[in-house]
Amino acid sequence: MSTISRVEITHHQLPLDPVFPASWDTQPRTKFPATIVRVFDDEGNCGIGSGDAMYGFDDYQRYFIGQDPLDLDRHAAVLSNVEFHAGRPWPMDVAMWDLAGKIRDEPIWKMVGGTSNRIRAYASSGVHRSVPEMVQVARQAIALGFPALKVRFGRPSLDEDLAVISAVRDAVGEQLELMVDCNQGWRMAWDTQRPWDVDHATVVAQRLEAESVFWMEEPLHRGDYDGMSELRERVNIRIAGGELTRESYEFRELLTRGCFDVFQPDCVCSMGISGLRHLAYEVHEQGKIFTPHTWGNGIGVMANLHLTAGTVGAPFIEFPFDPPEWTTARRDFILSETIEADGDGWITLSDRPGLGIELDEDVLARTRTGQATFA
Ligand SMILES: [Mg+2]
């Protein structure tokens, strides 16, 4: 048995030129921050994770040093306590799954259940473009083989947002499933705009339903349970959310109260692979869709691909992709190889151990910084 000998956390920032005007951020992004967590054992194995900036985690590292890396449920229980007292320490959970995979010589998709090593991706756009440009984005998604495209709302007027959906639907017909992210669940730290209320969300939902939109994402504040279950009573379109909801009891409440048709927790932000592998089955057993948020870097994308393909699967999973501002090269800059879908939108996971990825150490050295938030 090996023991955990060391945890290393480093911050990095990729300069972005052209800038990335993320639709959910009031400030155009000039940098893309990433925090890398590495967990070493005393036999020279190293597991990798990423996600949260992990500020303050140094104080808790001693609860892992000297432990058996394979005691994943024990480590997840400690991380759940750390989350209550501090930030979102789940990159550490992902790093320990990667380490455990390397020790066992098994890929994570197999360790979590082995249901499949394949999953289909949907193109998740991130920029508010004009109507003709969005039609172009949709045509490109079809050409690349993606079965679905997610469009962002939040332009100056609702009519402008709706014009995009109508034009895209007219242009592509049934060739592409469309999803709309309303981004009302949470805000960036500096953004004090209030979320929609259920009456406004209902008006939008009815319009999206008329355009056969597959799901409406985050139509209300993440804690508006009454609003979400009311919205689901009023309309027929699927309601999605939960991308940054933290705790298992919150997800259980969302399930019990009928708030969502589609659950989107991200294992690098909430509950880790350790917790979400169980939640995935709870969601699935109730006839709901489990398909994680993956907007972040390639480590998060890969961790959620393993988690989902290896457990309950999904009709499709988020693939952050909106060139030229959001390319796989930018998204996966920390990795030696970008993650790509094939010509039909499928991603096949390898049999390499753990996450099956390698870091690009030269890029990490060049982009090293002291902090990794968007602030
Ligand atoms: Mg979202």
Image: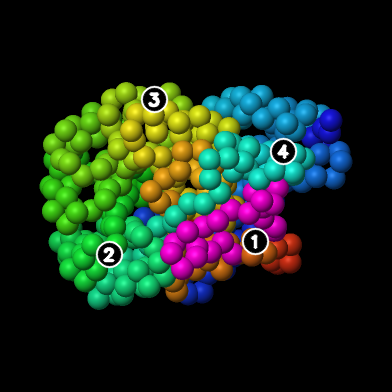
| Residue at numbered disc 2 | 175
The answer to whether residue 53 is above or below residue 18 is above
Front-lying residue, 120 or 334? 120
Q: Earlier in the sequence, mark 3 or mark 1?
A: 3
What is the spatial separation of the Cα atoms under label 4 and label 2, in whole angstroms? 41 Å
Quarter of the image where one finds residue 256: top left
Q: CA distance from mark 1 to mark 4?
A: 20 Å
Of the two numbered discs 1 and 4 in the rendering, the one whose residue sits closer to the viewer: 4
Tell me the mark number nearer the camera, choosing from 3 and 2: 2
- What residue do we see at 86% from left, 38% from top? 42
Q: Which residue is mark 3?
A: 252
Question: Who's the residue at 59% across and 36% down the image?
Answer: 112
- Label 2 vs label 1, nearer the camera: 2
Give the structural element (helix, strand or loop) at label 2: loop
First in sequence, mark 2 or 1: give its number.
2
Contact (Cβ within 8 Å) of mark 3 with mark 1: no
- Residue density around tag 1, few if under 14, some if 14–19, many if 20 or more, within 10 Å: some
Q: Which residues are magenta?
A: 338-359
Asked whether residue 123 is in view, the answer is yes
Mark 4–mark 3 Cα distance, whole angstroms, equals 28 Å
The residue under label 4 is 100
Q: Which residue is mark 1?
A: 335
**How has the structure been colored for display?**
rainbow
Q: Type of residue at label 2? A: Gln
Was residue 44 drawn as part of the magenta stretch in this picture? no
Among the two numbered marks 4 and 2 on one chain, the one whose residue lies closer to the N terminus: 4
Q: Quadrant of the N terminus?
A: top right
Q: How far apart are the two marked residues, 3 and 1, measured between alpha carbons?
A: 35 Å
Amino acid found under the numbered disc labelled 4: Ala
Asked where in the image residue 257 lies, by quadrant, the reply is: top left
Measuring from the top left, give residue 370's x and y in whole percent.
Answer: 66, 54
